Amino acid sequence: MIIVSDTSPINGLVIVGYLLLLQQLYERVLIPPAVADELRRGGEDNSRIIDALSLDWIEVYQPSDYQLIETLQTEYNLDRGESEAIALALELNAEELLIDERLGRRQAVRLGLSITGLLGILLVAKRRGLVREIRPIIDNLIEQASFRVSDSLYIEVLAAASETSD
């Protein structure tokens, strides 16, 4: 199974202490160099983020479709990490691209990629019995990682997990 990740799923899960969910769900996760760079920059405030880059199941791969990367950045206003992650997922025919940002998700779907975000990862983890509840994790993501989620999506995800939002 080939899984490619953008920055936010790894960053968020590191901050709330649930990074190993990615390994438990996917065994290995591929990231492009721009995502590794973004994680390193984020690690200036949290060394656990940089430590994630030394894990043997997170591997850095260089995408080769520089034209697509450039197009995604200039025409669709995506950042370098999102652009490289999308290009890498397409090149490797990834089963899933882990991405949260709305613009990046839109372009990934437009290009035919299957996507999952942090909330989807948590739902799968709960369904597989890897976590008992996702609400505390989501609340920690919001508080500690500045993760943004609308009230309606928050309620929808908790309902999908058979949890309450009150």
Image (cartoon, grey):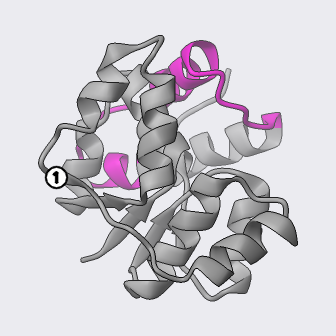
**Quadrant (top left, top right, bottom left, bottom right) of the C terminus:** top right
Question: Residue 160's spot in the image, x, y percent?
Answer: 56, 52
User: Which residue occupies 79% across, 60% down?
Assistant: 103
Q: Is residue 143 left or right of residue 10?
A: right
**Region rendered in magenta:** 122-151
Question: Residue 125's spot in the image, x, y percent?
Answer: 33, 49
As rendered, which of 87 and 156 lies closer to the eye? 87
User: Which residue occupies 54% across, 76% down?
Assistant: 87
The residue to which callout 1 is attached is 57
Q: Does the magenta stretch include residue 68?
A: no
As rendered, which of 129 and 26 lies closer to the eye? 26
| Residue 14 against residue 104 in the figure, above or below | above
| SS under mark 1 | loop
User: Which residue occupies 27% across, 43% down?
Assistant: 21
Question: Residue 96 is drawn in which quadrant?
Answer: bottom left
Question: Residue 35's spot in the image, x, y percent?
Answer: 48, 49
